[in-house]
């Protein structure tokens, strides 16, 4: 263990030294190769050349890492999706045909669809409500901090926390899960929430909503504060009440931000893995695509072809959001 | 914002109450875990954590030993003992199941056959009569146990359970994975913000696109790549580089201890993977921040003859500290909390299991060692919670800058 810590420490030092060494050394080399102090025309030409090369020296390591860890895998996954379990034998469209016909995948797709429907909507709505409410009271910042807190907790940690909430004991015993204690206190029968067909999906979603609401709240709260005072003052003078001001004056002005929050959470939902993996591992019809992919990747010897196919489907689902983001970023850059 | 003109909305109490309700809903689950982690396995098994804060009352019944064993005290036959087995105090007692709480502790209860029964608050009882006692007497009582908490779960988890090891492993994964990408990203962000070159707009678009690429995509290709590299590299054991590899723990060893190549599941592998996955956000955040720095400062140092490299190091990097801090917090939380990347790129042995992996294993093992699970989970979330509460300002700032507007 000590060796491991020393290695980690050394890597940080070596990594930083290497990075500095690279940037410093390559710049130095560039100045040697194209000296700006050369005579006459040569100097101008050298400066121009050095200026053309230097950005790429700065970008080099980042581009290399991005290419290896994000761009190459996309290409490789496409290639793998046309190949068999070990990635060697060409199987044509077989993996895709399997994907379309497989019952487990269907169930995972339906669940994913439910997640996409519920979690972004619920988180954004709750985030908007908490943002609007906490902005109006003195201890709002403390409240915000506490609602934002689950953001820092890992999905697995959150799963453990909620396992204690959902725990089930037979009806004649004292319930130790909070939800069942509440239900029995109100006179209902205790339920094993996590195995309850169909509805168990929603109990898993609650965990993600619990985590993401804080994120939505923070962003939307900043947007609400950015609304020009005059528009609200005008509405007050016209006799609008609080709710009217909120829904008719404030919300329309932050649609852009709401869309950003919504899409960001949508992407998180598409990738959701840990919660399902740790809580049910897909049992009781709670599977989602990301967990299916993991299952195909590792369990039962692994089938990289099918795993890659599922990964590609997740990627394809993300592409519309990706394009929308790029267009927004471009518009923003031109706006400057 | 709703108090324009000094008019306080009549709904203000409703607002306070709803926020209070939301806060309670959002914190109670975590509080439950926190309290549970200080309770013993017995307590967890029989009662909910919310009962831990108040004194617990439990009804019990016990039987005295047979009357034949009575001692003679001052001419009376007396059987004595204690009703409490686990400490606490007696709140009430009785001698019939119809009225189990009929008497206060210390009172003398008159039994039907003329004998008396008394139970003190500390649980001591006396069953006495002037004539020999017959059979044995049932005592009904209500025991009250004060709240009790224990640190034993934490002690057990940290010493015997391998959680300390997992904690160190998580730290080993998270810290370099946070530090390494920062410098690389800072240089790239500077180039994208302040240097002119063809293809810049396209590169920025690509990076915005890569922000949302699901990392699931990368797992299989990278794992195969790592495996191939591991198999293809044959390093002579006694060369300098071979020794360095052995020292750094990167080597893959055969059963007889000979190094046969590079280990595909090493810390170096996961550091680089986290670096790659974190770069798009890092570059995006830093570029957005750097482009907002005052143009005059940078232009005037250019005029004074400073090179790009000097401008970056002496002006842009120090000024970008808030953005660097924001990203560092994000990346640390993300790498500390990650389960998927660690499961794929680290071996599943006890010696290299990170905290999230350990928690997952504990969750999966049926038999429900809840006290272990609760303490382990709280240790694992305590680090991000400390980071969160200490550096929340930077986290919020980063979130606001990082969401694509």
Image (spheres, rainbow, N blue to C red):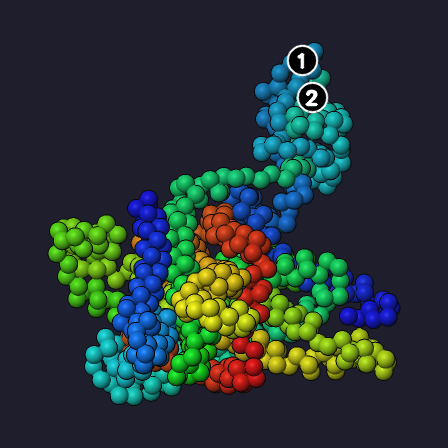
Say which chain tag 2 marks.
Answer: B
10 Å crowding of disc 2: few (<14), some (14-19), many (20+): many
Q: Is B272 positioned to the left or the right of A197 in the image?
A: left
- Give percent across and percent down for residue A157: 50, 57
Callouts 2 and 1 in the same chain: yes
Q: Secondary structure at mark 1?
A: strand
Measured in 3D between alpha carbons, the distance from the residue under mark 2 to the one under mark 1, in whole angstroms, is 9 Å
- Give percent across and percent down for residue B338: 43, 62
Q: Is A23 positioned to the left or the right of A322 in the image?
A: left
Do we see residue B148 in this rendering? Answer: yes
Q: Of the numbered discs in the image, which one, if any, rests on residue B128? A: 2
Task: Count all numbered tags in the image, as a single digit.
Answer: 2
Q: Of the numbered discs in the image, which one, if any, rests on residue A211? A: none
**CB of mark 2 within 8 Å of CB of mark 1?**
yes
- Give percent across and percent down for residue A98: 33, 84
The disc, 2 or 1, on the residue closer to the chain's N-terminal end is: 1
Placement of the C terminus of chain A among the 4 image quadrants: bottom right
Residue drawn at (47%, 74%) of the image = B193
Relative depth, front residue between B339 and B300: B300
Q: Of the numbered discs in the image, which one, if any, rests on residue B73? A: 1
Residue drawn at (32%, 79%) of the image = A40
Residue drawn at (37%, 70%) of the image = A58
Residue drawn at (13%, 51%) of the image = B238
Do we see residue A268 in this rendering? Answer: no
Q: Secondary structure at mark 2?
A: strand
């Amino acid at each position: 263990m000590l060796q491991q810590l020393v290695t980690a420490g050394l890597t940080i030092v070596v990594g930083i030294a290497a990075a500095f060494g690279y940037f410093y050394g390559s710049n130095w080399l560039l100045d040697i190769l194209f000296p700006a102090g050369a005579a006459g025309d040569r100097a101008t030409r050298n400066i121009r050349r050095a200026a053309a090369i230097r950005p790429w020296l700065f970008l080099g390591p980042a581009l290399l890492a991005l290419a290896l860890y994000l761009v190459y895998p996309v290409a490789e996954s496409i290639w793998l999706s046309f190949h068999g379990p070990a990635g060697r034998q060409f199987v044509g469209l077989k993996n895709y045909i399997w994907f379309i016909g497989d019952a487990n995948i269907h169930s995972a797709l339906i669940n994913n669809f439910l997640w996409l429907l519920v979690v972004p909507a619920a988180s954004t709505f709750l985030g908007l409500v908490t943002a609007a409410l906490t902005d109006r009271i003195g201890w709002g910042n403390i409240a915000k901090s506490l609602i934002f807190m689950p953001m820092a907790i890992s999905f697995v940690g959150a799963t453990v926390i909620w396992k204690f909430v959902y725990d089930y004991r037979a009806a004649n015993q004292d319930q130790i899960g909070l939800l069942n204690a509440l239900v029995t206190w109100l006179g209902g029968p205790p339920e094993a929430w996590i195995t309850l067909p169909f509805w168990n999906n929603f109990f898993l979603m609650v965990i993600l909503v619990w985590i993401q609401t804080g994120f939505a709240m923070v962003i939307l709260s900043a947007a609400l504060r950015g609304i020009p005072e005059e528009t609200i003052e005008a509405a007050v003078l016209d006799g609008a009440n609080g709710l009217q001001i909120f829904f008719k004056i404030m919300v329309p002005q932050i649609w852009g931000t709401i869309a950003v929050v919504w899409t960001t959470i949508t992407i998180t939902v598409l990738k959701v893995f840990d919660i399902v993996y740790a809580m049910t591992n897909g049992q009781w019809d709670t599977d989602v695509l990301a967990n299916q992919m993991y299952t195909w990747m590792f369990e039962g010897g692994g089938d990289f072809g099918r795993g890659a196919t599922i990964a590609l489907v997740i990627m394809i689902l993300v592409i519309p959001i990706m394009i929308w983001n790029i267009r927004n970023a471009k518009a923003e850059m031109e706006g400057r | 914002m709703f108090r324009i003109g000094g008019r306080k909305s009549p709904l203000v109490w409703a607002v306070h109450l709803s926020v209070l309700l939301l806060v309670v809903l959002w914190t109670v689950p975590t509080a439950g875990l926190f309290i549970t982690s200080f309770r013993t396995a017995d307590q967890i098994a029989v009662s909910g954590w919310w009962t831990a804060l108040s004194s617990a009352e439990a009804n019990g019944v016990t039987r005295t030993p047979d009357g034949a064993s009575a001692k003679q005290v001052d001419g009376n036959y007396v059987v004595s003992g204690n009703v409490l087995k686990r400490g606490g105090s007696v709140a009430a007692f009785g001698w019939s199941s119809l009225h189990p709480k009929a008497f206060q502790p210390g009172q003398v209860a008159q039994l039907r056959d003329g004998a008396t029964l008394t139970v003190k608050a500390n649980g001591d009882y006396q069953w006495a009569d002037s004539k020999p006692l017959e059979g044995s007497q049932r005592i009904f009582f209500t025991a009250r146990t004060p709240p009790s908490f224990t640190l034993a779960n934490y002690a057990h988890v940290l010493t015997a359970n391998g959680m300390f090891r997992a904690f160190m492993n998580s730290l080993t994964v998270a810290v370099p994975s946070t530090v390494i990408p920062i410098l690389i990203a800072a240089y790239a962000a500077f180039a994208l913000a302040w240097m002119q070159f063809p293809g810049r707009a396209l590169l920025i678009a690509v990076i915005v696109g890569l922000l949302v690429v699901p990392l699931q995509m990368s797992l299989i290709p990278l794992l195969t790549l790592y495996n191939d590299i591991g198999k293809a590299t044959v390093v002579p054991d006694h060369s300098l580089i071979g020794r360095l590899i052995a020292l750094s723990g990167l080597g893959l060893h055969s059963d007889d201890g000979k190094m046969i190549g590079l280990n595909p599941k090493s810390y170096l592998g996961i550091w680089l993977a986290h670096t790659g996955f974190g770069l798009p956000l890092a570059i995006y955040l830093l570029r957005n921040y750097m482009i907002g720095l005052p143009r005059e400062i940078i232009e005037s140092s250019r005029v004074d003859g400073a090179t790009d490299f000097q401008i970056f190091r002496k002006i842009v990097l120090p000024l970008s500290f808030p953005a660097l801090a924001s990203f560092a917090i994000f990346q640390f939380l993300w790498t500390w909390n990650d389960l998927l990347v660690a499961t794929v790129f680290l071996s599943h042995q006890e010696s290299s299991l990170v905290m999230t992996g350990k928690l997952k294993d504990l969750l999966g093992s049926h038999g429900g060692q809840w006290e272990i699970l609760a303490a382990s989970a709280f240790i694992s979330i305590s680090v991000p919670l400390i980071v969160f509460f200490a550096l929340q300002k930077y986290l919020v700032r980063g979130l606001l800058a990082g969401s694509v507007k």
